[in-house]
Each structure stands twice: as structure tokens, then as C-alpha cells.
Amino acid sequence: MGAHHRNRLLEALLGFALCLICCASPVVAFDNPELLPNKPTSVVDLAKAFSDTQRANLENSLDNFEERTGWKLRVLTQYERTPGLAVREFWGLDERSLLVVADPRGGNLLNFNVGDALYALMPRTYWVELQTRFGNQYYVKDHGEDIAILDALDAVETCLDRGGCQFVPGLPQEQWLLTFTTSLLGGVVAGIASYPKKEGELIAWPWLLLLSPLWVMLFGVFGIAPVVSRTSEVLPLVRNGLGFIGGALAAYLAAQAALGSSSDQETKT
């Protein structure tokens, strides 16, 4: 092997070793207190997500909410600069605190530092749903970063005023469409199952009861339960109920047309 090849091999091995060292090095948490303001405030808007008026109104709202309820809600927006762990001491975060960090670099705008006392009122699944509903790229694109943050805070305040929530209040359009689809599918299953299999029978009750776990799950568990647990509005329930009935009638008539015509042909032959 020539000297040139040995040098290239040595350089490659050295580069590989450096990569391993860099990858194995621990991640160091940032701590930049100089980015924090000198005066007390409940909102640190490093990313300039809010207008001056919005920021002032939000500060007053969060301060009034803390004075009224004892829950400490804080907001940090950042992009390229972050104060890191310095916010803990700056705000005195404890078990009754919630820190909302808005940073679009991770794909989802919102992240939450949740105090232990909050988990007793809203489980971890609540915070996951809160993040995915208001922090996703589509919601942020349609409403803006400022509204996404404000809507998430409004949902948290609503639940704290109620004494806790299992689910995020409100029923988004896409989530209602999902419940409507499952209600419709439940009706289709019920309609096909109820089509009579015997002469002179109007509804095949044994088959309808046999398949009840499936259509009850589609209609009740996935079609009705998510609605009643998130909103008190009646209109989504009425629509889902009509979807179930419409799907059942359509499937019943389709089965009658298909199976009835085949039985007529057998009779003629």
C-alpha cells in the first residue's frame, strides 16, 4: 500500500473517530439569563409572536388568573435564542405552574412544562391532545402563532376553572368529521345486519344483536362519546344520529336490492 493510500485511510479513520466523539458527547442544556427581562413579567416574547397590545393584554390576563385561582401560567416564545433553564428561577416554576414554550423549529409550535399538581386535574393525554390540536402546522398556518398560543391557554384556563378535564374542550371540524364517519359506518353495519334472512321477516333481530358490539362501538364509542366529552352542543349529536340512521337505511335498501334480485332469479329458475 502506497503512502498516499495510507494517509487517506488514516484521515478517514480520524474523521470517523471524531464523529463518534461528537455523537457520544452529552447534550449541554442552555442557560442564558441575559435574554430575560429585568422586570417581572408573565410573558417573554423573544420570537415576537405577539404585538405590543397582545402581549400587554396577555400579561394582564395571566396575572389576573393567577391572583384569582393560584395557578401560575407563563409563556415563552423563542426561535434562535433561548434562555433555557434560566426561566425556572426567573419565574419560580413549581408544581402549580405551567410553562408554554412556543418554538416552531420542532415541527409542532407548542411544548408544555407541566407542574405535578396540574397532572392531577388534566392527564398526560390531555396535554398531548392540546399540543396536537393547537400546535400543529396546519392550525398555526390558518390562525397564526399568536392565536394558537392564546387558544391553548384559553383551553387550559377553561379546564382549571372547571376543576379539571379529561379531554381538551371544543370539537374541531376535522374531529367531528371523523365521528360522523364512524357513525355512518356504524349505521351501515347495522343496516346490513338487520336485513331479513327469512321469508316474512322485517328485521333480522338475531343478526342485529350479534353484530351489536361492532356497530355500537362505531356509533357509540367513536361517534357519540368524543362529542359529548368535548362539547355541550346538540347539533353535532343530531348530525351523527342522522348519519347513523341514514347509513342504516341506505345499507338496508342496498341489501334488499342486491339480495332480493338474486332471490327472484333463483325463484324463476
Image: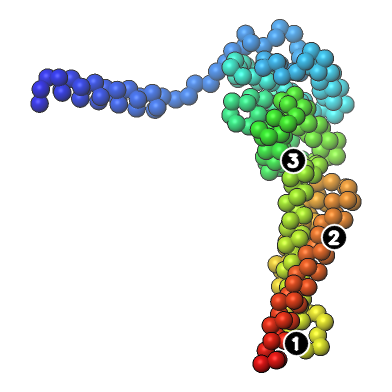
Q: CA distance from mark 3 to mark 2?
A: 33 Å
- Residue at image location 68% in from the left, 43% down from the top: 125
Left or right position of 18 against 209 = left
Percent x, y of residue 128 = 67, 40
Left or right position of 81 against 4 = right
Q: Which residue is mark 3?
A: 122
For mark 3, does the 10 Å Cα neighbourhood hold few (<14), some (14 to 19), or many (20 or more) residues? many
Q: CA distance from mark 1 to mark 2?
A: 28 Å
Q: Is residue 251 above or below residue 69?
A: below
Name the residue type under label 2.
Answer: Leu
Is tag 3's residue or tag 1's residue first in the polypeptide sequence? 3
Q: Which residue is mark 2?
A: 242
- Residue at image location 67% in from the left, 38% down from the top: 132
Q: Is residue 130 above or below residue 9?
A: below
Secondary structure under the numbered disc 2 in the rendered image: helix
In the image, 205 versus 102, the foreground residue is 205
Left or right position of 157 against 138 = right
Is tag 1's residue or tag 2's residue first in the polypeptide sequence? 1
- Residue at image location 77% in from the left, 49% down from the top: 176
Name the residue type under label 3.
Answer: Met
Task: Report which quarter residue 137 is drawn in.
Answer: top right
Residue 114 visible in image: no
Percent x, y of residue 51 = 77, 15
For mark 1, does the 10 Å Cα neighbourhood hold few (<14), some (14 to 19), or many (20 or more) residues? few
Task: Specify the quadrant that holds the C terminus.
Answer: bottom right
Percent x, y of residue 12 = 25, 24
Task: Report which quarter residue 165 is drawn in.
Answer: top right
Say the numbered circle drawn on residue 198: 1
Residue 1 visible in image: yes
Q: Are marks 1 and 2 in contact (CB under 8 Å)?
A: no
